[in-house]
Amino acid sequence: MIRIKRLVRHSVLGTASILLSTLWVSAVWGAMSAVTTPQASTDTGALLYSQRCAGCHDGPVARAPHKIVFPMLGPEYVLSAMNDGIMQAQAAGLSTEQKILLAEHLGDRALSRGEDAKVSFCPETKAADEALGTEIGSWGMSPGNSRAIDAKTANLNISDVPALKVKWAFAYPGATQARSQPIVQNGKIFVGSQDGTVYALDLDSGCAHWTFKADTEVRHALSLGSVKNVSSGALFFGDFAGSVYAIDQSNGELIWKTKANDHPDTTITGSPKLYNDVLYVPLSSREWASAANPAYQCCTFRGGVVAINTADGSQKWVNYTVDEPAPTGEVNNMGVAFLAPSGAPVWNSPTIDVTRNRLYVGSGENYSSPASKTSDAVIAFDLDDGELIWSYQSLAKDAWNMACFVGGVGGNCPSENGPDLDIGASTILHTLSSGKDIVLAGQKSGHVFALDPDKSWYCAFTGCEEGRVLWKSKIGMGGFAGGIHWGMTASDDTLYAAVSDRDFGLFPVSDALGGMYSISAEDGHVNWYTPVQDRCPEGTKPMCDPGLSAAITSIPGVIFAGGFDGYLMAYDKADGKVLWEFQTNREFNTVSGEVAHGGAIEGDGPVIIDSTLLVNSGYSFGTSLPGNVLLAFSVDGK
């Protein structure tokens, strides 16, 4: 997840880093409102915030979320809290329009208002499918998260790629980012959006069959499966506030809804993985931002996985990446006690190992010190009961939260203070041509590595810190938005990894641009490397950056990858040659008649099915290029 992260250690850039950090935080707060909200509305919302909210949400009030949380939740969530939620009393006396302006200011974008939310519905809704049919496009494309689509499903040859043209474009109403990877089944696309709307779109035309409204943003890929008494099947997904849903895939009607976790900062970033009527939901959180408030007791969230029965939404099991947090004996500069261990969120989609009856996830940083042995780690859980079977830590002593960025020394910043190099990309369970299974992982540090899932005999004596690692290679500079970020792909005996190495202009001595790598899955050596081309016009950085951060996807012969600069590219697997590229950072006429705008391609990756390539464009969190479009490509646009 790209979050507002610690930009650089003060020991490296000193006073200059503080100045740049201050400027960058101003850009984070103001950039998107300037794009999507009229200036008068922005000014009025800011004034209302100063008068009615700043006393609590600027801190330090222990139970009041820090203002940095609200852009993640979105204006719809804020408005609901004022109308019929926890903030009704505080909003008493405000008019409807004032509440809207305040919500838009806090949420950093415009609300989707009735007349603005134009969606083109299909002339007549097709009958519900009697069979589930083929599904493609969930985050990993397979239980093993290979992100490799077979030739029959893709129905797109390497010779077809240079002829790809836009077939249709769909505008997400009122959105500034598009990061829910589509899934496709029987000619229908299912995709979430920033305001929580789930769409069922027609693969051929882009018109909508139905919509469903979740409470907050649905930012990951949905899963499709069966539920008793629902003949057409159900869609399963979570939202940014930590709720999990099952809806009827034929009409979008709610079947059940439950909470993934009782921690108030829980969020679902990675795509839940469906296997054998159980939905495995990764647990991430917003507590890294809550900790910016020095009155907040840091920290209590624990990353992990919850297994949910698809029949009724009941919990089968839950297990965590860290033990129950306990007082460390230390206090912050306001006298608030520190708790540890905490954090180690899971913001990638679980990988299912059917043979060994396990699932694998990667974890992020701890939120408080001392750091645990399971942060920045690959962790194996038992599918049946959630028992933690083994873990491998790639980087030790990584504890960080937002207080290190906005508060500096003191407050809730952990003593270890970073470097915040999560394992954010989903692990890949891959079988080599020799028949050996390996677990492949990528990290924001710029490292890729392979683990042996069958080292049980060795681990009994050594703990596996060395013996489980088959190889480890550093292919990128790394950083808080660098290295390997969202997803790799593997086929045959090769791992393909996109490297961001985005520096937001803070490292002028660095000439790293990132690019695409082909790596031997057998021993980690680099087969080839294709650097990205810097197409960002003069003066557009750091909003524009050529780095490759989004998840990548492969079909036979081709790898598809999108960049921070909005370019979508196709690479030849054999030698890394760029076969085709397309600039999505521009305006598009859409099926609803609205004009949409593309931006950065970030988070989710391309989907290829039935000769159609689908990709989202637009990412507004931090200094990235906003956008609100889903694009469908086909050969010659037909």
Image: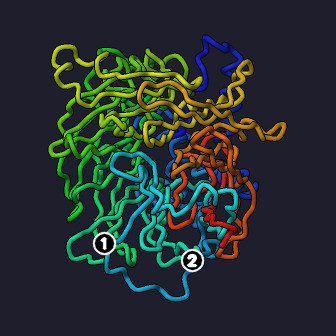
Few, some or many residues within 10 Å of mark 1 (<14, 14–19, 20+):
many
Measured as percent of width and height from the top left, residue 600 is found at 65, 48
Residue at 35% in and 34% down? 439
Residue at 69% in and 15% down? 15
Q: Which type of secondary structure does the marked residue at label 1 adopt?
A: strand
* Colour pattern of the rendering: rainbow
Residue 594 visible in the shown view: yes
Task: Give the position of the C terminus as an image quadrant.
Answer: bottom right
Left or right side of 462 for 588: right
Residue at 68% in and 69% down? 637
| Along the viewing direction, whichever of 100 and 203 lies nearer the viewer | 203
Q: Residue furthest bottom?
A: 124
| Along the viewing direction, whichever of 333 and 592 lies nearer the viewer | 592
Asked if residue 222 is positioned above or below residue 210 in the image, the reply reads above
Instruction: Tell which circle, 2 or 1, labels the residue nearer the N-terminal end.
Output: 2
Q: Residue furthest front?
A: 434
Asked if residue 404 is positioned above or below residue 534 in the image, the reply reads above
Left or right side of 388 for 434: right
Measured as percent of width and height from the top left, residue 192 is found at 48, 61
* Amino acid type assigned to the residue bearing label 2 in the image: Cys
* Amino acid type assigned to the residue bearing label 1 in the image: Gly
| Along the viewing direction, whichever of 481 and 29 lies nearer the viewer | 481
Measured as percent of width and height from the top left, residue 501 is found at 62, 30
Please give the residue where the numbered disc 2 appears in the rendered image.
207
- Among the 4 quarters of the image, the one containing residue 99: bottom right
**Label at residue 233:** 1
Q: Which type of secondary structure does the marked residue at label 2 adopt?
A: loop
